Each structure stands twice: as C-alpha cells, then as structure tokens.
Image (cartoon, grey):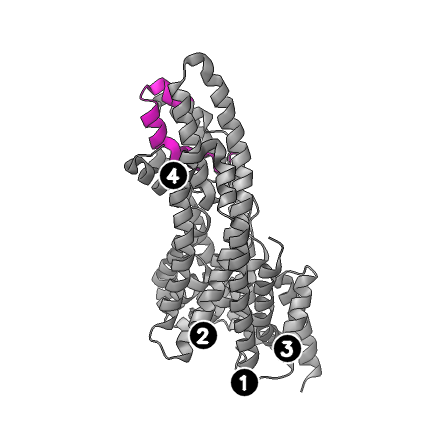
Amino acid sequence: MSMERGLHRAVFLRSLLIQACWSYEGMQNLGFLYGLDPWLRRIYPDPEEYRRAAFRHLEFFNTQPYMAGFAFGVIGGLEERRARLPEEQRRAVEDQIVRMKKAMGSSLAAIGDTFFWGALKPACAGLILLSWLVFWSFGVSRPVLLGALLGLACFNAAALWVRWRGIRVGYATQERLPDEIQRLRWHERVRWVRRLGLAAALVLTVAALVVPPQGGSPGWWGPVLLAAAAGARAAGLSAVRSYGVALALGCVVALAGP
Amino acid sequence: MNPWNLFVLPALSAWVALLECDSVLVGQWMVSRPLVLGPSVGFLCGDIRMGLAVGTLCELFSFDRAPVGSAIPFNAPVAAGCAVLLCAGPDAVPIPLAFPAGLAAGYGHRRAEYALRFWRARLTRDAAESLEARGRVDWIRIHLLSVGVHALLTAAFVYAAAGVLGPGLSAGWDVLPDLARRGLQNALDAAPFIGLAALMHVFFRKA
C-alpha cells in the first residue's frame, strides 16, 4: 500500500500539534482528530459520513507524541478499509479501530517514553554540555550556539524521522505493526543511546571534578559531594530534595566554618 | 514603573512563554529545554554566561521525572527563565538565591498547568458541538485558544515571578543572616554535582 505524498505531509505537519489541546478528559483526542482530519475528509466526501468518523476519534487517546505517526498510519489505513466495505461489515472495523487505538496508545507510549524521554533527551543534553566543553577548550567561536544546535539536530533528526516514517510504516503494516516495531530493535537502540549518554556524563563529571564549576582548585570535597549526591539519588531522593538537604548541610558547614 | 518592568520584562516573559509552548503543546523540538532557553534569555539580557550556568543547572535538575502520561514534572523552562530574569533584572538577585527561587517558580507553574489541563476539556465539547452544528471543527480557533491561553498565562506567571519577587528577594538577600547566605552559596556549589548525579542516574535506570 502506498500513501499520497501530499496527504503524508499534511498528517505529519498536523502531528506536530498532537498535544496542543491536551486535557485530562480526552488527553490527545483533539490532536489525534486534527492530525487525521485531512485523511478523513478524503475518505469520506459525504459530510454525514465524515461527521460520524470525526466523532469516533473524539474518544480518549494518548500516546508518546513522537510515536503518534504509527497510530495515524494504522488508523488512517483502517478507516480506508472501513470505507470500502459494505454497510453491514463496517461495524466490525469500527470496533477494531477502537481496540487498536487503545492497544497502540499504551504500547507505543512505553517504547517512546523509554527511548525519547529516558535515553535520547538526557543523552542529547549530555552531548550539548560535552560539546560546549570541547568547543571552549579548542577556542571555537560561538561555542554556545554551535553546541546547542548540535544537540538539537541530533534529537530532532531522530524525533522527526520517527514522526515522518511512522505514518508510512503504520499505514503499510497496519495489524502487523507490532512485528515491524519488534524489527526496529528499540531496546537495542535504547541501550546504545544510554551508553553514549553515560559516556558523555562520565566525561562531564570528571571535568567537573578536575575543574570545579564554581572556580578554584579541585579539592577533596568534589568526589565526596558527587558520591553523596549519587547515593542520595540511588536511594530515591530527587535532585530538588537533594538540593534542600545540601542547603541545610551548607548552613551547618557555614556555621562550623571560619 | 521603570522601563525594565514596562517594556523589557514583558518582552522577555513573552519570549520565555513562546519557547515554553514547545515543551508540551507545539512541536516538542526541545527548544524549550533550559540548556537552550537559559542561554537565549541570558543573551537577550546581555549575560550569556549566567544564562548558561542557570540553564545547565535547571536542565540537570529536570531529569528526575519524565513527562509521562498525565504527570506534570516541575516546569524546567519556567524555572530557568525566572531564575535568569531574576539575576539579570535591575534588582540583580544573586544566583544562590535566584536558582532556588526559579525552582520554586517551576513548581508553582505546575498548578497553573494542572488547572489549564482541566479547562481544556471544554475544547473537546466545543469541537463536538461544532461538528454537530456545522459538520466541521474550527481548528484555528481551538488551537489559538488553547495555545494562546497557555502562553498568556505562562508569560504572566514569569512576569509576576520576576517582576514581583525580584525586588523582594534582592532586599531579602541584603538582610539575610550571613549564615543563610553562606548556606545558599554552599548549596549552589553542590548543585552541579547533584545535577550530574541525576543525569547519570537516568542512564542507569532499567530500560
């Protein structure tokens, strides 16, 4: 199955607003309908048919925004299939659409959250910080701008590609989407991105220990602070709470100090 | 009112609000991240290094909780924007006080976001009524309303946080006991290590 380029572009551009009307009641329901709208209008030239289809997609929907392309492709394809069927067989496909949206929403979100929020975003933040460090060390001009652009380019190359490609993959595979997703080996990619991110974070940490961010010469307190912070985080204390503890301890140190 | 409060701060608050829309509502291109927003606001205020330092700390502190499902983590772009504006404003709040104040603003914005997410449910009802009555949804109106109200609220929040808190915090810093000031400075010195530990922890979490 192939998809018309203009329609693909329209759904892709509209998918950038999938969270624009996010609410607790329907979550991404309006965003999903907005993305699918040009497709529905093409499938259902009859206004009444279009209206009924649009109402079907006002139901609750939520997934990871970058992974929504897969859902658009699958559901658009199913709507096309429904429109080709005789009236008495359409109900079954409508039920299938509801089931698929529910199942895809949570499973795509699980993959997307792990990859984009849990691996790529922090890794790109590490890359930006590392690039600033390198650019400054080598006297590159406009290090802040270049580093930020590098990190944004890395993140968006992956995010936009998944958004764009997901629509076509979803449309082409439909019910076979889980197999296709499996074939993309997300877990392996997550592992690699995390390794790269961890390497960047370790270099930054060593740099912070050798050249303290607050200035002055490195001291014994750097590794102690880092070990304490890492221990607190491993014990489940958030960074903001750790900061609160640091504030209290900071006052104690100030009290004990000269 | 001085020119900062009348012209500069509203414009910078609008800039923060505009970039902040990227974090959830529009695009998610990551231009709202404190690593980008902090230096950009710092640059506009004429102190890119300060923006960079504050933005970096806010970014590292934001990895505690991912924006998964209906969770609202503390708003890192608002935290970075407020902290930079507090430092760069005419009251020049010192970073050891501006940074925790920025974090508090980031947490404060969560309440506004929470209320907005409930309010947006009416947009679904508007869309349903529009579909029923006219057979189409007025997408431009719905998006302008949703994104516009969010951006306006965020801009007003940042303006209030930087414009109202600034003079108070600056005056408070002057009368703060030396012990508290040194405590705040010590906490700020520890912040990069706390942030780096948070960053490393993300990569050790189970996939």
Pointer 1 residue: A216
Crowding at dot 1, Cα within 10 Å, few <14 / some 14-19 / many 20+, comes out as few
Give the overall secondary structure of the magenta segment.
Answer: helix
Q: Could you tell me the amino acid type at mark 4?
A: Arg
Q: Tell me, yes or no, whether dots 4 and 2 are on the same chain.
A: yes
Residue A161 placement, left or right of B63 = left
**Magenta stretch contains residue A34:** yes
* Gap in angstroms between the C-alphas marked 1 and 3: 15 Å
* Gap in angstroms between the C-alphas marked 4 and 1: 55 Å
Closer-to-camera residue (A186/A8): A186
* Gap in angstroms between the C-alphas marked 3 and 4: 50 Å
Pointer 2 residue: A133
- What subunit carries mark 1? A
The disc, 4 or 1, on the residue closer to the chain's N-terminal end is: 4
Pointer 3 residue: A223
The disc, 4 or 2, on the residue closer to the chain's N-terminal end is: 2
User: Is residue A32 visible from the viewing direction of this image?
Assistant: no
Q: Tell me, yes or no, whether dots 1 and 3 are on the same chain.
A: yes
Residue A228: quarter of image:
bottom right
Which marked residue is nearer to the observer: mark 4 or mark 2? 4
Q: Please determine whether, in this image, residue A109 is positioned above or below residue B179.
A: above
**Residue B151 image point, x, y percent:** 41, 49
The disc placed on residue A168 is 4
